[in-house]
Image (tube, rainbow, N blue to C red):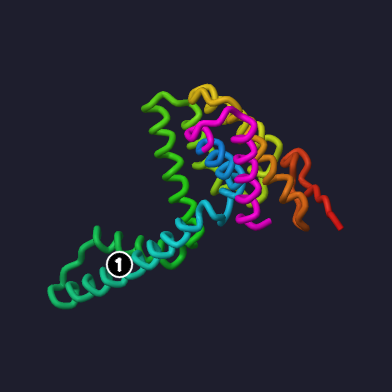
Amino acid sequence: MKGSTHLAIGTVIGIAATLIQPFTVKNAALYIAVSAFSALSADLDGPSILSSSLGKASKQIRQILVWLGLILTTVLTFLFLAEQKFYPEYSIICLIALLFGFITKVGIIRNALVSVIGGLMMVSGWHFQMNWIIGLGLFVLIAPWLKHRGMTHTIWALCIWGVISYSMEQQLQVDGLMAVATTSYLSHLLADTLTPQGVKWLYPLYKKSIKLRIK
């Protein structure tokens, strides 16, 4: 299922919440933002709308590393030929830059950037004593390294999302946030269940994908 479809479903859920719950501008903004993010979060385990901009950044970083390695190689070669001097520290940096640039996949760099954001969220949550931010940060930190449509697309991940969103609702004192977040996350899993690939709801206990085809 396309990310835009998940986003649309999550947004609709958020709008519905604003109609059901007592209306304030702040609460409406929270419902829509939380539902939209929750509907996309399961796809943090691979390229998605949430990480696409980081994917572009990772390509740029990879190119910078390649060029840095080539420039350093040129400079070190010139210094060695001209002055007969060898710089082991710079040579190691050069080697790492070249290896990282040529061998490391762009996806790995993107995953690292997403994980850094998750780590920063955890630090912020600890600093401001908000457990839900710590939990969300841990989810964001780990998710990029998981197999696509693996653990983030399971009933267990939905339960974890429910715990995080319950803590968020209690901290922010906005009724219905947990229901909005979990319903939106659930909508992602249900929508993916309708695709040919399906979803491994009970992975790793049951490793086969569950599919529902609507004719």
Q: Is residue 33 magenta?
A: no
Give the residue type at disc 1.
Leu
Is residue 201 left or right of 116 when viewed as pictured?
Answer: right
Q: Position of residue 7 (x, y in %)?
A: 60, 50
Q: Compared to 205, does 51 lie above or below?
A: below
| Closer-to-camera residue (125/171) | 171
Q: Is residue 139 left or right of residue 101?
A: right
* Main SS, magenta residues: helix
- Residue 164, given in percent of the width and then of the height, sits at 56, 30
Quarter-wise, where is residue 79 in the image? bottom left
> Mark 1 sits on what residue?
68
Q: From the viewer's perspective, is residue 78 above or below residue 60? A: below
Query: x%, y% of residue 205?
Result: 76, 38
Check the image and name the residue furthest to the left: 83
- Residue drawn 65% across and 58% down? 2
Q: Secondary structure at mark 1?
A: helix
In magenta, the rendered stretch is 1-28
| Left or right: residue 174 compared with residue 100 | right
Q: Residue furthest right?
A: 215
Does the stretch in magenta take in 21? yes
**Residue sitting at 59 percent across and 40 percent down?**
35
Camera-side residue of 92 and 30: 30
Mark 1 surroundings: few (<14), some (14-19) or many (≥20) residues within 10 A? some
- Percent across and percent down for residue 17 are 62, 35
Q: On screen, 179 above or below 144?
A: above
